[in-house]
Image: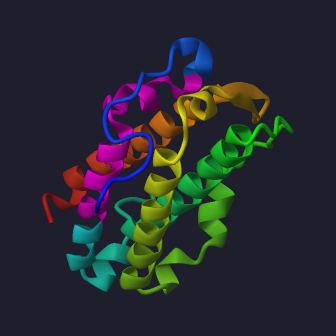
Amino acid sequence: MRRVGFHRGMTQRPSPAEYVPYFATYVDDAEDDPGSQLTIQAGEIAAFGQVDEAAAAARPAPGEWSLKEVLVHLSDFERMFTYRALRFSRGDATPVEAFEQDPYVAASEANERPLESIIGELLALRAATILFFESLSEAMLSRGGMAGGNPVTVRALWFIIAGHCEGHLRDLRARFGEV
């Protein structure tokens, strides 16, 4: 993917004051250049298309998510957090509610969808996410608001999206190997 926009390389990492401790692991799992990390992750996500449908819908243990459910969760999370970033980057300080991931996954009917469709949706979303964050100026990245009752900056949201995905990809690599 050709990189355009303000941020074509590393950006300042968010300080701990830009997000609550709950998100520290995600920020830590993000690289110094979240745009490049998101691009690399897209390639890894695409590779999961090699997994057969039965394996993609299988849960590794009761109560754990299938590959399809993890990928739909990544889409849901990325949409929610990019939406927050859009609002805050545009100066809209209206508080945004939290979302509970488990009911979203349960209602998604992910295991009834073709894996190709889930991956296609996530990759299209990822391309839009990358372009959106690369379009933001430093001033926009520094803006923030309240999400789920907690303060967060747009910059922190960018790092949180990249780090959140990285954690799930690490788990999927352990489960499926390099696909």
Q: Residue at x 76, y 36 (%)?
A: 148
User: Looking at the image, which is closer to me, 159 or 71?
Assistant: 159
Q: Is 151 on the left-hand or right-hand side of 125? A: right
User: Looking at the image, which is closer to me, 93 or 22?
Assistant: 93
Span highlighted in magenta in the image: 22-45
Above or below — where is 5 with respect to 93?
below
Give the quarter of the image for residue 8. Answer: top left
x, y percentage for residue 51?
23, 76
Give the quarter of the image for residue 96. Answer: top right
Residue reaching furthest to the left: 178
Asked if residue 37 is among those painted magenta in the image, a careful observer would answer yes
x, y percentage for residue 179?
15, 66
Q: Is 29 on the left-hand or right-hand side of 146? A: left
Asked if residue 83 is among those painted magenta in the image, a careful observer would answer no
Q: Residue at x 61, y 72 (%)?
A: 108
Q: Residue at x 43, y 83 (%)?
A: 117
